[in-house]
Image: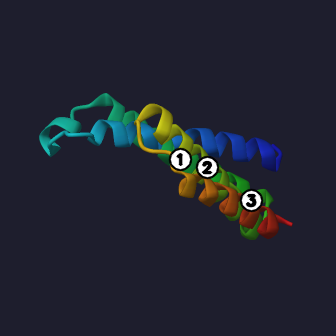
Amino acid sequence: MGLAAYAVVYTTLASAGLILVRRSLEDAPFSEFVHDPAFYAGGLLYATSFATFLASLRAYEVLTVFPLFTGVTYATVTLGAAVFLDEPLTASRLAGIVLVAAGAVLLVR
């Protein structure tokens, strides 16, 4: 599998997992969210993203994988939180996405 494919799989799993976990934690006391299937589904997706990260490390340098995966996931989680969790997407957050993306590109080269 190529680096781009690993990045897409990792980002999709990690972003979906984080958003599901966050949604299950909204306004829920501990006794309720532990019974929410979305909490466990999110945790499973996030754990699977880590397995994808480990698989990618077998073929690529950590100095390539980590910044790429982290940067792309930062952007997708930020956008996903705005769309699915109604979290504010401010100009400074958009600027942060651009700066992280630029940093990831420089580190991957």
Q: Gap in Å between the C-alphas at discs 1 and 3? A: 28 Å
Image coordinates for residue 104, horizontal then vertical, percent: 73, 63
* Mark drawn on residue 67: none
Residue 2 relative to residue 44: left or right = right
Label 3: which residue? 58
Residue on which disc 2 sits: 75
Would residue 25 appear left or right of 42 to someone viewing this image? left
Quadrant in which residue 14 is drawn: top right
Query: Which amino acid, by three-letter code, is at mark 2?
Result: Ala
Mark 1 burial class by Cα count in 10 Å: few <14, some 14-19, many 20+: many
The residue labelled by disc 1 is 78
For the residue labelled by badge 3, is the local secondary structure a helix, a strand or a loop?
Answer: helix
Q: Quadrant of the N terminus?
A: top right
Q: Nearer the viewer, mark 3 or mark 2?
A: 2
Q: CA distance from mark 2 to mark 1?
A: 5 Å
Give how far across and how far down residue 70 sits, in percent. Answer: 62, 58
User: Mark 1 and mark 2 in contact (Cβ < 8 Å)?
Assistant: yes
Q: Nearer the viewer, mark 1 or mark 3?
A: 1
Mark 1: amino acid? Thr
- Mark 2 is surrounded, within 10 Å at the Cα level, by few (under 14), some (14 to 19) or many (20 or more) other residues, namely many
Is residue 14 shown to the viewer in this render? no
Q: Is residue 79 visible?
A: yes
